[in-house]
Image (tube, rainbow, N blue to C red):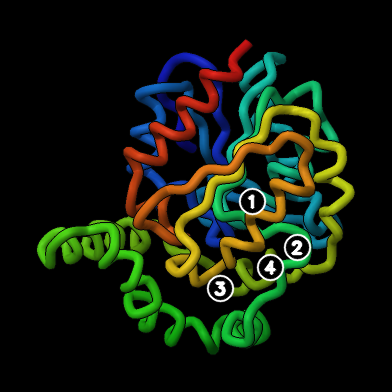
Amino acid sequence: MFDQGKGPAVVVVPGVQGRWEWMKPALVELAGRCHTISYSLCGDIGSGEKADPALGFDNYLGQLDAVLDRLGPAPVTLCGVSFGGFVALRYAAAHPGRVKSLVLVSAPAPGWKPNPQQARWISRPWISAPVFVATAPMRVWPEVRATFPNWSSRLGFFVRQGLRTASAPMIPSLMAERARLARQLDFAPDCARITVPTLVLTGEEPLDRVVPVANTRRFCTLIDGAESGVLERTGHLGIMTQPSKFAEVVGNFVHAHNH
């Protein structure tokens, strides 16, 4: 679990890979502005919690509820990254008294469907895993090239992020199950129940090859009063490629609504 910093509390819910370690540079940056908490999703190595198959998606809501219990009764900002946006959104809709504001980062909105390649990975996670890992640099290359100015900085990013992901390995079958669970649910009613200030943060349209930016921006019409923001020269990996900018944007939003 990650727990650092002072000031208004922000709980960052990780993406479908489930590991907070993948986002550590951004969490450290955000901790310079806010009390920042993150954790690994239940079922993952290091989470300390098993996922109960009978509970389905509710596993993640119960886990987040326990994290907030440890923080105390004061409401917090929830920041959901990609799949974590589903968790943060549904929790905020169900427990409005515990959430002060909401940030959705490159999160799939209602209507999202996996593309054909993603659907193949979801249907055969372990068989697809070697190809998924081997082709990852090629998939993110346009974003890395746009973010980093030269070859040395690009190589440095791949090395650093590669070491982080190797030290906090994903579980392909668990990732696929999370995607399937999310596809079974309708999150549109949750959007209609959100009353707290909400920031919808995306990368640039051509660079996000995981969740189309246009889909994430649907939250701005589904959630009353939602603000939109863009991390320039990033795509789906803005929290990893631009940790300082991510922390600046989220930190400013949190403090602006810390009443």
Q: How far is mark 4 from mark 1, CA to CA? A: 14 Å
Q: Residue beneath label 4, please?
A: 179
Badge 3 element:
helix
User: Identity of the amino acid at label 1?
Assistant: Cys
Q: Are marks 2 and 4 in contact (CB under 8 Å)?
A: yes
- Give the amino acid type for the residue marked by disc 4 in the picture: Ala
Q: Secondary structure at mark 2?
A: helix
Between the C-alphas of marks 2 and 4, the distance is 5 Å
| Callout 4 touching callout 3 (CB < 8 Å) | no
User: Relative to residue 88, is residue 228 drawn left or right?
Assistant: left
Q: Amino acid at mark 3?
A: Pro
**Label annotation for residue 42:** 1
Q: Is residue 255 left or right of residue 92?
A: left
Residue 166 coordinates in the image, percent (x, y): 34, 64
Q: Earlier in the sequence, mark 4 or mark 3?
A: 3
Answer above or below: position of 220 versus 121. above
Q: Amino acid at mark 2?
A: Ala
Q: Of marks 4 and 1, which one's residue comes earlier in the chain? A: 1
Mark 2 — residue? 182
Residue at screen point 66% across, 62% down = 215
Q: Nearer the viewer, residue 112 or 123?
A: 112
